[in-house]
């Protein structure tokens, strides 16, 4: 999770950059971000993603994310 490396709750990334970083099409990133917004895990809008519910994001990863703690 990017939050582990930035030391805050805000991550400044565009949908396009996320798509390149993840090797997926940009519309997939947009749909995924919209899903996270609907679930209340990140706030809606903009290029700044704030982590609102970190525990919810970790739970949604179904074990794919292992916290460095």
Image (cartoon, rainbow, N blue to C red):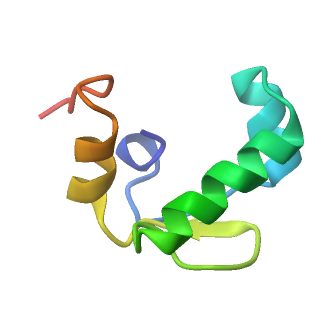
**Does residue 41 appear left or right of residue 60 in this picture?**
right
The picture places residue 45, in percent across and down from the top left corner, at 71, 79
Outermost left residue: 69
45 left or right of 66 in image: right
Image location of residue 38, percent across then percent down: 51, 72
Left or right relative to 50: residue 28: right
Tell me the quadrant of the picture where the N terminus can be found: top left
Q: Position of residue 33 (x, y in %)?
A: 63, 57
- In the displayed structure, 69 sits above or below 40; it is above
Q: Is residue 16 above or below residue 43?
A: above
Q: Position of residue 9 (x, y in %)?
A: 42, 66
Q: Quadrant of residue 12?
A: bottom right
Looking at the image, residue 45 lies above or below residue 23: below
Q: How many marks?
A: 0
**Residue plotted at (20% across, 29% down):** 68
User: Could you say which quadrant of the image residue 47 lies in?
Assistant: bottom right
| Residue for point 86% across, 32% down | 25
- Residue drawn 78% across the image and 20% down it: 23
Q: Quadrant of residue 18?
A: top right
Q: Residue at x 32, y 44 (%)?
A: 60
Left or right of 24 on screen, residue 33: left
Q: Image quadrant for the C terminus?
A: top left
Between 41 and 5, the one nearer to me in the picture = 41
């Amino acid at each position: 999770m990017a939050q582990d490396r930035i030391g805050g709750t805000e991550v400044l990334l565009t949908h396009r950059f996320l798509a390149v970083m993840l090797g997926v099409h940009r519309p997939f990133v947009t749909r995924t971000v919209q899903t996270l917004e609907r679930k209340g895990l990140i706030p809606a809008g903009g290029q700044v993603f704030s982590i609102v519910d970190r525990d919810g994001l970790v739970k949604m990863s179904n074990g794919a994310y292992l916290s460095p703690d």
